Amino acid sequence: MERAAVFDVDGTLVDTNHLHVTTWWEAFRQAGHKVPMHDIHRSVGLSSQDLIAHLLGDDLDQDEVDALSAAHKTLYGTYFDRLPPLKDAGRLLKRLDDDGWTIVLATSAGGSELSALRRAIDADDAIKATASADDVSAGKPAPEPVEHALDLVGIPPERAVFVGDTVWDMRAGSRAGVTCVGVLCGGIPRAALVEAGADAIYRDPEHLLALLPDSPLAPEA
C-alpha cells in the first residue's frame, strides 16, 4: 500500500516565516495596529483570516479583515522572485519520491504565491498533489487541510506522515491521526512542537534527509 508524506511549505520547505512576520507587521502598522513581531511569529501558519482574529480579536468587520489580508499579500508579493528554499528541501522531496512515498503539499498559500513557493522548492516532478486552505472550510489547526491532502491521493492517515514547523501544523496532523514530524527551521521551539503533538523533531530538511533511514519517513524494508 502507498504511503503519503504531507508537507507544510512556509517555514518547512521555504525560509519565509520571517518574511511573513515583517509583511504582516507592516500591514498592521499601515492600518494603525501595533502588534509585536514575536506575537505575529507565533501566529504564522494560520490562515489570514484566523491570524488576524488571533492577533486582533473577532471584533473587526470583514472589510477591515479583507483590507489587512490584501495589504499583506501585496507586501509579501514583492518577494516572490527570490523566496529562499531551505537547504535540501527539494532533494528531500525527490528522495522520498524515489523511496516510494506519495508527496503532497498542505499549505494556506494559493495562486501566484503557491507558484512562487513551488519554484523555490524546485521539485515539481516529485509533488503529486497540493491541498490549499482555500479547498477546506477550516484551516490549521483544524485537521481538514491534512485530511484533504490525504483524500487527494487516496491514502489513509495510518499510512501518512505530516511534516511541519508550527504548533498549528502539529495540532492539525495529530487531529487528523497521522504521524507528525516537526522541524525547527520555522523558529518555533522544540518543546512547543512536542507539546502540540510532534512525534519526532529535526532541525530542517537537510537534517531530516541526513537521518532519513532512522526517521518516520524511512523507506519500507
Image (cartoon, helix red, strand yellow):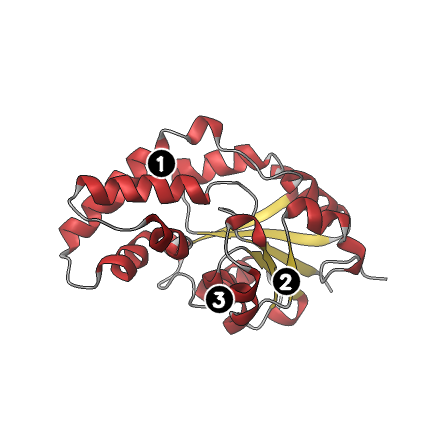
Residue 10 % position (x, y):
48, 46
Q: Quadrant of the N terminus?
A: bottom right
Q: Where is 51 relative to 78, above or below?
A: below
- The residue indicated by pointer 3 is 172
Residue 46 % position (x, y):
38, 57
Instruction: Give the distance between the C-alpha atoms of the residues marked 1 and 2, in whole angstroms.
Output: 29 Å
- The residue indicated by pointer 1 is 76
Residue at image point 32% right, 52% down: 48
In the visual, does 71 lie left or right of 213?
left
Instruction: Give the distance between the C-alpha atoms of the residues marked 3 and 1, in whole angstroms.
Output: 25 Å
Kind of residue at badge 1: Tyr
Give whichever of discs 3 and 1 has the lower sequence position: 1
- The residue indicated by pointer 2 is 161
Q: Are marks 1 and 2 in contact (CB under 8 Å)?
A: no
Kind of residue at badge 2: Val
Dot 3: what SS? Answer: helix
Q: Badge 1, how many Cα within 10 Å: few under 14, some, many 20+?
A: some
Give whichever of discs 2 and 3 has the lower sequence position: 2
Q: Are marks 3 and 1 in contact (CB under 8 Å)?
A: no
Name the residue furthest top: 81
Residue at image point 71% right, 62% down: 216
Instruction: Give the distance between the C-alpha atoms of the residues marked 2 and 3, in whole angstroms.
Output: 12 Å
